[in-house]
Amino acid sequence: MENFDWKNMPFGYVKTDYNVRCYCKNGKWGELEISSSEYINVHIAATCLHYGQEAFEGLKAFRGQDGKIRVFRWDENAKRMHVTADGIQMAPVPVDIFRKAVFTAVKMNERFIPPYGFGASLYIRPLLIGTGAEVGVKPANEFMFMVFVTPVGPYFKEGFKPVDIMVCRGFDRAAPLGTGCFKVGGNYAASLTSLELAHHQGYSTTLYLDPKEKKYIDEAGPANFFAVRNNIYITPESKSILPSITNMSLQQLCRDLGIKVERRPVPFEELSTFEEVGACGTAAVITPIRKIVDPDENRIYEYCRDGKPGPVSTLLYNKLVAIQNGEEPDVHGWAELVD
């Protein structure tokens, strides 16, 4: 692509050439359709508009040092969207349709895939919405699945550099036994006010505590939280946390590297005992955290005292990015080549 500043590309939307769509009617999915339009026609009574019946995913394609294009762990995204669809009474997208739509969208927009070496990638957004018209609160009987792509840079403008975040006790991202473990837009809508509050005060994101007791660490804004202590990778377990595919991958890398993994409830009091803390997800990969500010308790938890990411975070980040870019062997078969 000409006139693209790949090195300084933000995490935002850029128009590409094509997107892929598929419709489900009478319980049956149709054939994929290719569109060059950025818009969709939706009935005014569609359940996605009134009752939040929608699900989405986020994954990436990378151009490796060998020039080949790799899509990272698309099958896990397909599984997670299936779980979400079941959870909010939508028609699950068959795995073969999910894969074909993702790879078709990537191939048809190949010219937008950033070159190797700039820290940018092609972000892939699968979207499933209820399009059937309902006025009563009930599931739709028609659905649309689509995939669009856009080139992106790092989610946080700092990239792989330590950031400051703020503890947010006055807001909850999701409720226990609610939709927190599903990737639905409502969870993100619930986080917008607290995120804007944090941004206005100079922080990159918020740290949410468990919505029931406010005793345990839940999520770090739109990403999973993790910590390192005594060569142990610690990440929260909760029914209101989205199961991050990046976090899952980091846990496997830890086991490969001889780092013990603990996935469990993490009491807030443990913050003072950690050597490293960070946020992880598809968009950011790993964002090291330098400082956690707790305004309610007037306390600050500091890490990365030399201004650099911790050694375990750095090791895991470099290892995962190297696999995504084809720089290291993909022993787990996470990255699938685009023909």
Image (cartoon, rainbow, N blue to C red):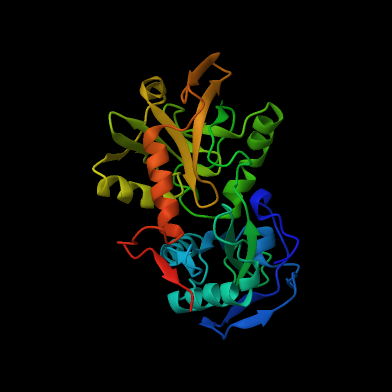
To which quarter of the image does residue 167 belong? top right
Q: Is residue 4 above or below residue 38?
A: above
Q: Tell me if 112 is positioned left or right of 26 in this view.
A: right
Q: Nearer the viewer, residue 142 or 7?
A: 7
In the rendering, at what x and y percent does residue 187 appear?
57, 47
Question: Looking at the image, which is closer to me, 144 or 280?
Answer: 280
Count the labels in the image. 0
Q: Is residue 87 left or right of residue 190?
A: left
Residue at the limit of the structure toward the bottom, as seen here: 31
Q: The N terminus is located in which quarter?
A: bottom right
Say if 130 sits above or below 315 in the image: below
Asked if residue 182 is positioned above or below residue 20 in the image, the reply reads above
Query: Is residue 272 visible to us here?
Result: yes
184 and 197: which is toward the camera? 197
Q: Using the rendered view, name the quadrant where residue 273 is placed.
A: top left
Q: Residue at 37% of width from left, 25% of height from top?
A: 274
Residue 206 % position (x, y): 57, 33
- Eyeballing the image, is 16 above or below 178? below
Residue 270 in the image: state x and y as whole percent: 37, 23
Residue 218 in picture, x, y percent from top left: 45, 36
Is residue 303 toward the left or the right of residue 133 in the image? left
Q: Is residue 142 visible?
A: no
Drawn side of residue 294 relative to residue 266, left or right:
right
Give me the residue at 30% from left, 61% from top: 331
